[in-house]
Image (cartoon, rainbow, N blue to C red):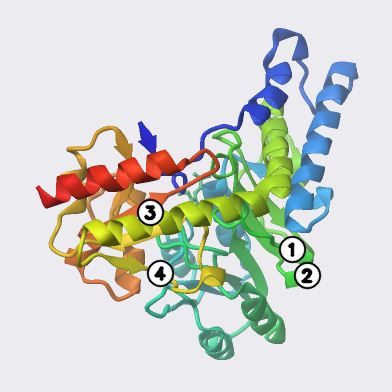
Amino acid sequence: MIYLDHLASTPLDPLVLEAMLPWMQPGAAGNPHAAHAAGWRAADAIEEAKGEIAALVGARPGEVVFTSGATEANTLALLGGLPPGGGCVVSAVEHASVLGCLPELRRRGHPVAVLPVDGSGRVDPADLERALTELPGPALVSVMAANNEVGTVQPLAELATAAARHGALIHSDAVQALGTRALDMEALGLHGLSLSGHKLYGPMGIGALILRRPFRPVPPSAGGGQQRGLRAGTLPTPLCVGLGAACRLARQRREEDARRVAELRDRLWRQLCRRLPGIRRNGAAEDGDRLAGCLSVTLPGIDAADRLLDLPDLAVATGSACHSGAGEPSHVLLALGLSAADAHASLRFGLGRGTTEVEVDAAAGRLADLLKA
Ligand code: PMP
């Protein structure tokens, strides 16, 4: 299998697995919230993990709230984060876990603004200024750090400055950015940030919402009051430790990963261009404005999803893949201005830490052979 779908999920790094394994042994039993030695040991390991997570994003350990993943983190931030009567501003290219909150916010009477993006997928900070001027009352802004379908990086610093000028809180879904880009919540002035273990070579089923004052969403569930009541439930020690280890590795490796993966992405693009005339690239043109590991392309006239079925040993995402096989054209590609037909003719390659030149060359060759046939 040639796995070029790292934006959907990254394989577990062996060092992360190694860090987790001791906490999965029978001898490691102990509720991390319990008041005895076994509980304290687990609680200490979780505290250490929070330190690693906080260090990756420029926050403090006490600001980390574990969740089951970024979907839950985004939902808690948006559905729990609006003050009564407060407005919400998001971009048109947010993940479904953000956009999916909007109907409920509207139902509750919150004004909602959805910012357009340009042809590369970028939000214009002037549009945020305008939206915040028009919204009555306090607002929560949520704009992702980098897009999961086309890799476009958003101008978070300018967006945070605009939010601050209007006294709005700003949250960012940073799931895709953290593996290859530095991001400092304190320096940027972000109040909330979502991340996910399985996009960072960590375990599935764990993520975090980082909350900086004065952002304090109201949780949907009651329970044992764990995590300062923000997300009740016993913390899964092995997963928390794994997320911590993944964040430590990301901090150590992100520069090297970004450089290597961007080279492979460009190599893949050159090969596809040579073999498939008419192919177009989606997203930002400049290296600084796009994710190292993402290459989104359109092959006009080709039903990508359909044809890919003939390449079962190549894992690549299609223009509708992010909606778990729903078959709808991607809302992201449509927001960039692509037609529904072109969105269906699009593929997303997600390159990662383990990707090799041999794999990239083989993927380009097999795709070209298939699509030309
Ligand atoms: N946000 C973005 C940008 C994503 O790419 C994803 C995963 N596709 C999510 C949120 C959801 O993350 P999780 O799988 O951890 O719920």
Foreground pick, 74 / 111: 74
Task: Report crowding for label 3: few under 14, some 14 to 19, many 20 or more residues within 10 A (C-alpha).
Answer: many
Q: Is mark 4 on a helix, strand or loop?
A: loop
Q: Which mark is residue 187?
A: 2
Q: Earlier in the sequence, mark 1 or mark 3?
A: 1
Q: What element carries label 1?
A: loop
Front tag of 2 and 3: 3
Amino acid type at mark 3: Leu
Q: Which mark is residue 184?
A: 1
Task: Report crowding for label 4: few under 14, some 14 to 19, many 20 or more residues within 10 A (C-alpha).
Answer: many
Quarter assignment of residue 316: top left
Vertical order, 256 against 204 (above or below): below
Quarter assignment of residue 24: top right
State yes or no: discs 1 and 2 in contact (Cβ < 8 Å).
yes
Foreground pick, 78 / 1: 1
**Residue 48 coordinates in the image, percent (x, y):** 83, 37
Q: In which quarter of the image is the N terminus?
A: top left
Front tag of 4 and 2: 4
Front tag of 4 and 3: 3
Residue at mark 4: 283
State yes or no: discs 2 and 3 in contact (Cβ < 8 Å).
no
**Residue 335 coordinates in the image, percent (x, y):** 34, 72
Q: Residue 268 carries which label?
A: 3
